[in-house]
């Protein structure tokens, strides 16, 4: 493209989102080089919009000056992602109220109350869920998210939700994050319950939902800081959970279906039209 076009803001926008690149001048034209060929299509699509929409260029200028980025790294404060902060606070509050899953309130957060329903077979689980929802206890569809059974469990989930969820809330808005949270919760909790019953909990399904959303949505329109190694590790951990090794190593049974359901929910939400982006 012509050298008269100022690509500095676009270059900074790519750099802040972890897209390795460089721009050179060759023969009176500017050439954009990418290290990752798979990012060529979404980056070129973003560049076309940058060149054709003056209002987008102005938005990127404001976005590049965002206080959530420090030295090109995503370092938000609580005011940048209040919904994420609220989710984490509620999760820690439930840890205290349930005694880390050992108190009397624990069964009130499970998808169905295992004390009053038979759930040994799939047919019994379906009937228990139908009866529970018919009685008006619809909160149970989401409440297993806030049931944790160990400190490493809730700390890891909180760190992941803060790092990835704050980016979704900042760039795509609270409505998109809330939609992602609900869809990931419903699919992850529902799938885990149908396979194994109500004795599970945690935000892991939501974490995988946000991860799947960020990964696929970022490929379509780069804007998130998401290390490729993080996605590789998460998928490997999900596969690891389906082997006998976790129980053999004393890690207990993992909520594999919750992880899978959440990840699929995130991919599904990533196919939605782009949300209105924040400046």
Image (cartoon, rainbow, N blue to C red):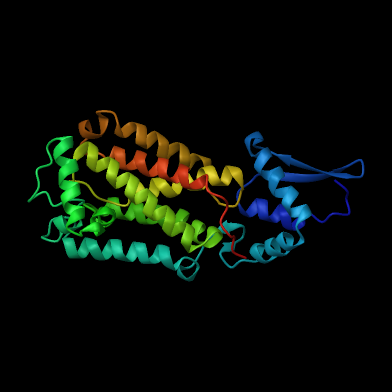
Where is residue 73 drawn, in percent x and y?
A: 57, 57
Front position in the image: 159 or 171? 171
Front position in the image: 274 or 136? 136
Above/below status of 274 relative to 194: below
Is 254 placed left or right of 79 in the picture?
A: left
Quarter holding the N terminus is: top right
Where is residue 162 drawn, in percent x and y?
A: 43, 58
Q: Residue at x 72, y 54 (%)?
A: 10
Q: Residue at x 26, y 39 (%)?
A: 254
State the residue lying farthest toward the left: 116
Q: How many marks?
A: 0
Above/below status of 228 relative to 180: above
Can see residue 253?
A: no
Where is residue 48 drawn, in percent x and y?
A: 75, 48
Where, by quadrant of the figure, is residue 190 drawn?
A: top left
Can see residue 130?
A: yes
Q: Residue at x 18, y 65 (%)?
A: 97
Quarter holding the C terminus is: bottom right
Where is residue 259 drawn, in percent x and y?
A: 34, 41
State the residue lying farthest toward the front: 134
Is 102 placed left or right of 178 in the picture?
A: left
Where, by quadrant of the figure, is residue 127 drawn?
A: top left
Is 62 placed left or right of 240 in the picture?
A: right
State the residue lying farthest toward the top: 244
State the residue lying farthest toward the bottom: 79
Front position in the image: 117 or 104? 117
Is 56 placed left or right of 111 in the picture?
A: right
């Amino acid at each position: 493209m012509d050298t008269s076009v100022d690509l500095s803001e676009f270059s900074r926008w790519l750099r802040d989102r972890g897209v390795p690149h460089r721009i050179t001048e060759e023969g009176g034209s500017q050439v954009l080089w990418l290290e990752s060929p798979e990012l060529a299509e979404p980056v070129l699509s973003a560049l076309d919009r940058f060149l054709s929409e003056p209002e987008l260029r102005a938005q990127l200028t404001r976005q590049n000056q965002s206080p959530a980025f420090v030295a090109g790294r995503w370092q938000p404060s609580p005011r940048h992602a209040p919904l994420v902060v609220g989710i984490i606070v509620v999760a820690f509050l439930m840890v205290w109220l349930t005694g880390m899953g050992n108190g009397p309130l624990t069964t009130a957060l499970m998808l169905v109350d295992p004390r009053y329903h038979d759930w040994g077979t799939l047919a019994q689980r379906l009937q228990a869920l139908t009866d529970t929802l018919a009685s008006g206890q619809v909160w149970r569809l989401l409440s297993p998210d806030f049931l944790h059974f160990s400190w490493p469990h809730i700390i890891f989930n909180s760190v992941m939700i803060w790092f990835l969820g704050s980016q979704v809330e900042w760039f795509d808005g609270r409505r998109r994050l809330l939609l992602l949270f609900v869809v990931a919760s419903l699919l992850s909790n529902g799938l885990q319950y149908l396979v194994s019953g109500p004795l599970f909990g945690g935000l892991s399904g939501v974490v995988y939902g946000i991860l799947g959303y960020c990964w696929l949505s970022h490929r379509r329109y780069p804007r998130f800081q998401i290390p490729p190694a993080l996605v590789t590790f998460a998928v490997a951990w999900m596969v690891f959970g389906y082997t006998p090794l976790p129980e053999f190593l004393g890690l207990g049974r993992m909520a594999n279906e919750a992880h899978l359901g959440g990840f699929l929910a995130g991919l599904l939400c990533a196919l939605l039209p782009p949300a209105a982006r924040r400046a």
